[in-house]
C-alpha cells in the first residue's frame, strides 16, 4: 500500500513537471509568435506582389545617390506648450548604397557605402540620437528589410483599407518570425492597390547586437516619382522619454530625401536667331564696352554658381509657382522704391532647412525652411529686402567663380567650396538699406507680423543653432563674439508686438514643412495648398518645430498630362 502511494506520488509529480514544462514552452512560444487571422486569397496575393515590388525598390535605391538631410530637435518640458526645443542638429548628406544592400557588410560597414564621402554623417547622427548608432539602422528606415522580407521571416495581419490622398491602400500589420528576431521590422505597412508597392511604413526595428537603442520609431512616406516606382521622400522620427511622464517626447526629427535624378542645367542661347537667306548685318554700336564686359563677367560667375548648386541638388530647378511668388514681392519693393535696376531680379529656392538667404549676382535665394516658417507676405518681404539691399548697394559676388575649374569638386563639398555669405560691414549696410526699402514699400503698415516672427526667432535662437546657422549664405541671426544672438533686421523686429506664447491668436512663425513641397525626382518645388485650421491651445502653434508627416499621395502623371499651376500674386495665408 505504501509502495503504491509512493508510485502514485511519483506519477503525479512527473505529470506536474511535464505540465510545467509544457506551460513554459507555451509561454515562450507565445512570446515568439502571434496568433493571426488567416489571409484571404486576395490579401495573400497583395502580400506576395508587394514582396516582389519591394525588391524592385531596393534595386532602384542601389543605382541612385540622392541628397538627404536630417534635422533633429531635442525637446524639453514647457509649462505652456508642453514641450519646446532644447537643442537641435542639422546634418546634410548624400546616400549611396553602392551594392551594399543584401551583402554581409550591410550591417557591419559604418564608414563607407551608405554615405559616400560623408563618413562624418554617421558619427554626427550617432551623437544626435544619443545612441550607439548602427549604419544599417538608418538605412533600414528607407527599405523594409533588405534581405528577408518574405513569408518565411514575417507574419502579416490584414487591418483594412484607407485612402492616403488619392491613393487607395491595403493596411497590414507586420511581425517578424520569431518575434524576438534581431533587426526585423515590427509595425504597419500601407500597400497601394494597383501594383502593390509599399507607400508607407510605420514602426521600428527589433533589437540588434547593439541593443534596443540601435533603432528608433519612424514613419516613412514614399512618393510615386516615376511610373510604377515609389521611393522614400520623407521620414519622421520620434522617441519618447519613458523615465519622465511629464516629458513625453525626448526628440523628434525629419529626414528628407531628394535628388534621385540629378541633371546638369541646360541653357538656351538667348542670342540665337533664325537664319535668313541673303541677310546682311547692318547693326550699329554692337561692340562691347569695358563696363558691359565687366557685368557679363559677373553674370558668368552667377550662372556658374547657380548651375553648380543645382547640379549638386542644393537649389531647386526654376519653379514658376514658388519663384513667381518671390519675384512678385521683390518687384513690389523695386517699383515702390523707384530702384533703377536694368536687369530683372530672379528668385530661386535653396532646398535645405536652415533659415538663410543669399544673393548671387541678380538672383536671390531663400531656403525652403525660411519660406516654410514665414507666416505672411509682409514677413516674406522683410527677408527678401535684406538680399535686395545687397544687390542695390552693389555687393558683388566673387568673380573667381567665372572660371569653371573652380567649381570642379565633389557634390558633397559644395557647402564648403562655395561660401556666399557677406561680410559684417556689407550685412550692416544691407540691414540699414532694407529698413529704408520696407519703409517706402506697400508693406510698411504690415510689418508687425514680420517683427513678431523675428521676436520668436530671437527667443528660440539659442536652442535652434542648427536651424539658424547658415551653410552657404546669410542667416537672420547676427553672429557676434558676445553671443547675444541679435538679428540683422533688428529695426524690423522692434516693430513687432510683445511676444506672448500663451496667446492663441498670436502666430509668430509656422512649423517646418508648412509652405513648400518637393518633387524628389525632378527637384522642383511647389506651394502647398493647406486648409486653414483653428488653433485651440498654444501647443498647436509649434513655431520652427519639426512635426509629424502626412502626405497627400498621388500617382505619377507624365509632364504632358500634368497641368502647370499659375503663379499666385500673393503669398499663401497663414495656417
Image (tube, grey):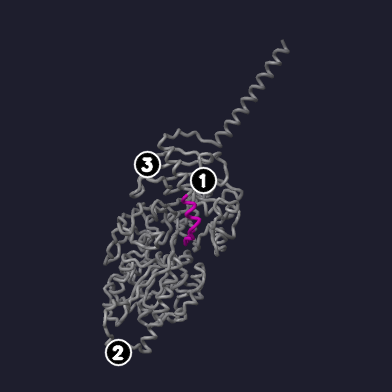
- Residue 267 in the magenta stretch? The answer is no
Q: Nearer the viewer, residue 427 or 193?
A: 193
Q: CA distance from mark 2 to mark 3?
A: 71 Å
**Image: magenta residue range:** 56-73
Decide: is 461 above or below 341: above
Of callouts 2 and 3, which one flags the residue occurring earlier in the amino acid sequence? 3
Residue 49 at x, y percent in the picture: 44, 43
Q: Secondary structure at mark 1?
A: strand
User: Measured along the vertical axis of the image, is residue 490 above or below residue 288?
Assistant: above
Badge 2 is on which residue? 285
Residue at image position (41%, 62%) is: 544
Visible residue check, residue 247? no
The residue wearing badge 3 is 161
Q: Looking at the image, do the residues carrying marks 1 and 2 touch, with CB atoms under 8 Å apart?
A: no
**Which residue position holds label 1?**
185
Q: Earlier in the sequence, mark 1 or mark 2?
A: 1
Q: Which of the marked residues, 1 or 3, is nearer the chain's N terminus?
A: 3
Label 3 sits on a secondary structure element that is strand
In which quadrant of the rendered image does the N terminus lie?
top right
Residue 154 seen from this side? yes
Mark 1 and mark 3 residues within 8 Å of each other at the beta carbon: no
Q: Nearer the viewer, residue 173 or 538?
A: 173
Give left or right: position of 537 versus 220.
left
Residue 306 position, x and y percent, is 41, 72
Amino acid at each position: 500500500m505504501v509502495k503504491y502511494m509512493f508510485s502514485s506520488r511519483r506519477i503525479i509529480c512527473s505529470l506536474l513537471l511535464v505540465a510545467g514544462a509544457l506551460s513554459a514552452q507555451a509561454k515562450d512560444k507565445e512570446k515568439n509568435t502571434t496568433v493571426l487571422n488567416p489571409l484571404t486569397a486576395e490579401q495573400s496575393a497583395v502580400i506576395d506582389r508587394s514582396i516582389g515590388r519591394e525588391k524592385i525598390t531596393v534595386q532602384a535605391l542601389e543605382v541612385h545617390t540622392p541628397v538627404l538631410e536630417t534635422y533633429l530637435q531635442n525637446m524639453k518640458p514647457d509649462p505652456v506648450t508642453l514641450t519646446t526645443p532644447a537643442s537641435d542638429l542639422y546634418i546634410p548628406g548624400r546616400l549611396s548604397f553602392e551594392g551594399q544592400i543584401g551583402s554581409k557588410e550591410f550591417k557591419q560597414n559604418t564608414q563607407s557605402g551608405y554615405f559616400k564621402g560623408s563618413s562624418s554623417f554617421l558619427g554626427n547622427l550617432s551623437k544626435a540620437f544619443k545612441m550607439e548608432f548602427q549604419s544599417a539602422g538608418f538605412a533600414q528606415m528607407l527599405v523594409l528589410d533588405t534581405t528577408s522580407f518574405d513569408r518565411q521571416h514575417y507574419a502579416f495581419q490584414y487591418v483594412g483599407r484607407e485612402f492616403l490622398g488619392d491613393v487607395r491602400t491595403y493596411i497590414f500589420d507586420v511581425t517578424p518570425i520569431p518575434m524576438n528576431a534581431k533587426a526585423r521590422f515590427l509595425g504597419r505597412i500601407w500597400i497601394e492597390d494597383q501594383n502593390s508597392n509599399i507607400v508607407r511604413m510605420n514602426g521600428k526595428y527589433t533589437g540588434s547586437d547593439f541593443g534596443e537603442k540601435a533603432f528608433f520609431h519612424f514613419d516613412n512616406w514614399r512618393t510615386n516619382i516615376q511610373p510604377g516606382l515609389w521611393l522614400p521622400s520623407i521620414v519622421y522620427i520620434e522617441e519618447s522619454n519613458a523615465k519622465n511622464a511629464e516629458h513625453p517626447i525626448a526628440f523628434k526629427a525629419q529626414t528628407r530625401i531628394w535628388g534621385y535624378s540629378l541633371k546638369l542645367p541646360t541653357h538656351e542661347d538667348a542670342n540665337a536667331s533664325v537664319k535668313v537667306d541673303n541677310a546682311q548685318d547692318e547693326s550699329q554700336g554692337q561692340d562691347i564696352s569695358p563696363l558691359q564686359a565687366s557685368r557679363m563677367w559677373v553674370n558668368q560667375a552667377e550662372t556658374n554658381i547657380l548651375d553648380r548648386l543645382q547640379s549638386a541638388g542644393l537649389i531647386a530647378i526654376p519653379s514658376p509657382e514658388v519663384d513667381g511668388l518671390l519675384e512678385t514681392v521683390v518687384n513690389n519693393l523695386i517699383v515702390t522704391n523707384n530702384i533703377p535696376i536694368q536687369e530683372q531680379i530672379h528668385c530661386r529656392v535653396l532646398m535645405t532647412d536652415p533659415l538663410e538667404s543669399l544673393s548671387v549676382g541678380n538672383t536671390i535665394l531663400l531656403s525652403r525652411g525660411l519660406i516654410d516658417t514665414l507666416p505672411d507676405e509682409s514677413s516674406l518681404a522683410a527677408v527678401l529686402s535684406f538680399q535686395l539691399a545687397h544687390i542695390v548697394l552693389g555687393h558683388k559676388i566673387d568673380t573667381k567663380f567665372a572660371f569653371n575649374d573652380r567649381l570642379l569638386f565633389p557634390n558633397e563639398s559644395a557647402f564648403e567650396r562655395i561660401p556666399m555669405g557677406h561680410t559684417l560691414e556689407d550685412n550692416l549696410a544691407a540691414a540699414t538699406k532694407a529698413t529704408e526699402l520696407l519703409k517706402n514699400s506697400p508693406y510698411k503698415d504690415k510689418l508687425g507680423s514680420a517683427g513678431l516672427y523675428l521676436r520668436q526667432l530671437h527667443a528660440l535662437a539659442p536652442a535652434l543653432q542648427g536651424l539658424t546657422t547658415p551653410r552657404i549664405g546669410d542667416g537672420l541671426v547676427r553672429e557676434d563674439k558676445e553671443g547675444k544672438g541679435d538679428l540683422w533686421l533688428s529695426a524690423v523686429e522692434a516693430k513687432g508686438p510683445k511676444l506672448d506664447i500663451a496667446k492663441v491668436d498670436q502666430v509668430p512663425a509656422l512649423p517646418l514643412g508648412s509652405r513648400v513641397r518637393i518633387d524628389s525626382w525632378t527637384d522642383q518645388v511647389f506651394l502647398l495648398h493647406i486648409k486653414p485650421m483653428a488653433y485651440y491651445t498654444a501647443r498647436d502653434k509649434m513655431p520652427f518645430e519639426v512635426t509629424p508627416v502626412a502626405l497627400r499621395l498621388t500617382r505619377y502623371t507624365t509632364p504632358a498630362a500634368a497641368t502647370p499651376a499659375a503663379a499666385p500674386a500673393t503669398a499663401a495665408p497663414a495656417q
